[in-house]
Image (cartoon, rainbow, N blue to C red):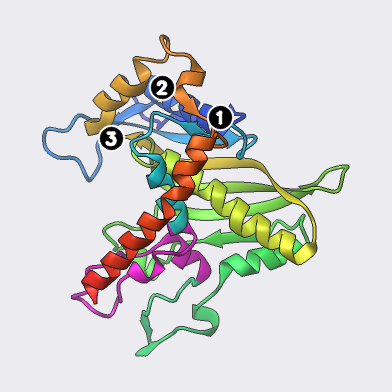
Amino acid sequence: MQKNIPVLTVSGVTLAEAYEKALVALYKNGIRFKTQYDKPDDPLSIDSTMNITILEPFSDPMIHRAFPGGIENLKEYVMELMGLKDHWVKNINDPNDTRWEYTYHGRLIAYGAWKEKINGTSQQNGFFCIDQINAVIEKLSKQPYTRQAQMITWMPNLDINCFDPPCLQSLWYRIIEDEDGVWWLNCNVRFRSNDAWGASFMNMFGFIHFNKNIIAAGVSQKTGKKVELGRMNWQADSYHIYGKDIASAKQLLFDRINSIDFADRTFNFGDDFITEMYNGAEVAILEKIKNYDNGIE
């Protein structure tokens, strides 16, 4: 009789390698599980608790071809993590507002500022509105070896009864200095729930870029130090492939691993055509956001 959820651990040098290892480990060793999102005829999901370590997050091959999206989607998600869609979050005090419940960037840069009322007053400043991103950058800049450089998303007053609460729970940082004086930003990321097939690659890709372009860049600017990305450890309480997605995952990855070389299952982020697609997507994404904004005004 099965009574324990498997705890699986994988490690890879690059994002593409670690992502593939995690999916394969889940497929081979995960447990079958129901979810609250299943339709009546959906197969059971494959689930586990997963620990993934990416040793060189910004090394190639970074992009795995077996993720349900394109290069443009990766760019849009990175832009979202930079705050481009924070204004899409609804006003909690307006029952007719049907916009998003949250954005990760919004929870990190303005924790508590969801216009909730406390004693009848909307709190936007002081304790109830905390810029965790700049606080972490400041902490790491002053004391890179601190164990207190952490950001959280969970707001119990809102999320316990939220239909779709944040999957990301926390980000934790610490810096190691090497013999050449280079600072290496190490990061632990915890998700309570992570859709292994439908979202996890984009999540990991996005936070690698968040760490590089916001946290590492911010610390470098404050200290004058060269700050590179060290390992990223990704902890998912529930790392799962939904039952409805298992057939696609088999067709696009699991049934092909033994017949296709790893190099043909991945892309280098540094390749010119990938870089051109990635950077070239920004104009269309900004237009998409503008059109959405115009539609809700």
Give yes or no for residue 96 being in the magenta stretch: yes
Q: Which residue is mark 3?
A: 242
Label 3 to label 1: alpha-carbon separation: 26 Å
Mark 1 lies on a secondary structure that is loop
Residue at the spot x=40%, y=57% of the render? 283
Residue at the spot x=37%, y=56% of the render? 285
Front position in the image: 282 or 65: 282
Quadrant position of the C terminus in the picture = bottom left
Label 1 to label 2: alpha-carbon separation: 26 Å
Can you tell which mark lies on residue 61?
Answer: 1
Q: Amino acid at mark 3?
A: Tyr
State yes or no: discs 1 and 2 in contact (Cβ < 8 Å): no
Front position in the image: 259 or 123: 259
Pick whichever of labels 2 and 3 is earlier in the sequence.
Answer: 2
Residue at the spot x=43%, y=55% of the render? 282
Q: Position of residue 288 (x, y in %)?
A: 31, 60
* Residues in magenta, as a range: 80-109
Q: Position of residue 108 (x, y in %)?
A: 51, 65
Callout 2: few (<14), some (14-19), or many (20+) C-alpha neighbours within 10 Å? some
Q: Amino acid at mark 1?
A: Pro
- Please state which of the two labelled residues, at mark 3 or mark 1, is closer to the viewer: 1
Q: Residue furthest top?
A: 259
Can you tell which mark lies on residue 170?
Answer: none
Front position in the image: 166 or 286: 286
Q: Which residue is mark 2?
A: 29
Quadrant position of the N terminus in the picture = top left
- Inspect this view and state whether residue 119 appears: no
Classify 141 as above or below 65: below
Give yes or no for residue 240 being in the magenta stretch: no
Among the 4 quarters of the image, the one containing residue 220: bottom right
